[in-house]
Image: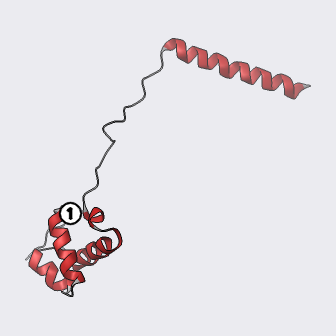
Amino acid sequence: MEKPTNQQYSFEIKKEVAERHRAGETAMDLAREFGLSSEQLVRAWSWKWRKGGDEALKPKPKGRPKGSVAPKPLSEEEKLRRQIARLEAENAYLKNCGT
């Protein structure tokens, strides 16, 4: 029997496996019963659940948060203003270094 890898498991399955492992069932038996790819998954879920509770077993959102947006590109005028400010600061620095 080939076991699945890179599979996503639901929160409910993870929690049930973790609870039963913490109650004394062996990781190997639970991995077989639930068709998990490794008994190490059972130990990992059990450890996470013990350390972080239910929240530790819930899936984490991936990617960029919906509220954040990429910054708007600067207008040509704003680019030139920033370049002028940088060059003025550079000139002031070079004047002070020379004397």
Determine whether 24 is above or below 88 in the image: below
Location of the C terminus (image quadrant): top right
Q: Is residue 83 left or right of residue 11?
A: right
Q: Position of residue 27 (x, y in %)?
A: 21, 83
Q: Residue furthest right?
A: 99
Colouring style: secondary structure
Quadrant in the picture for residue 64: top left
**Identity of the residue drawn at 18% across and 67% down:** 5
Quadrant in the picture for residue 35: bottom left
In-front residue for pair 99/19: 19
Label 1 secondary element: loop
In-front residue for pair 6/56: 56
Determine whether 96 is above or below 27 in the image: above
Determine whether 14 is above or below 60 in the image: below
Q: Position of residue 76 (x, y in %)?
A: 50, 13
Q: Residues within 10 Å of mark 1 (few under 14, many from 20)?
A: few
**Identity of the residue drawn at 48% across and 15% down:** 75
Q: Residue furthest left?
A: 1
Q: Is residue 71 visible?
A: yes
Q: Is residue 38 visible?
A: no
Q: Position of residue 24 (x, y in %)?
A: 21, 88
- Label 1 belongs to which residue? 6
Location of the N terminus (image quadrant): bottom left
**Identity of the residue drawn at 81% across and 25% down:** 94
Q: Residue furthest top?
A: 77
Amino acid type, callout 1? Asn
Q: Position of residue 37 (x, y in %)?
A: 18, 73
Quadrant in the picture for residue 87: top right
**Identity of the residue drawn at 33% across and 41% down:** 65
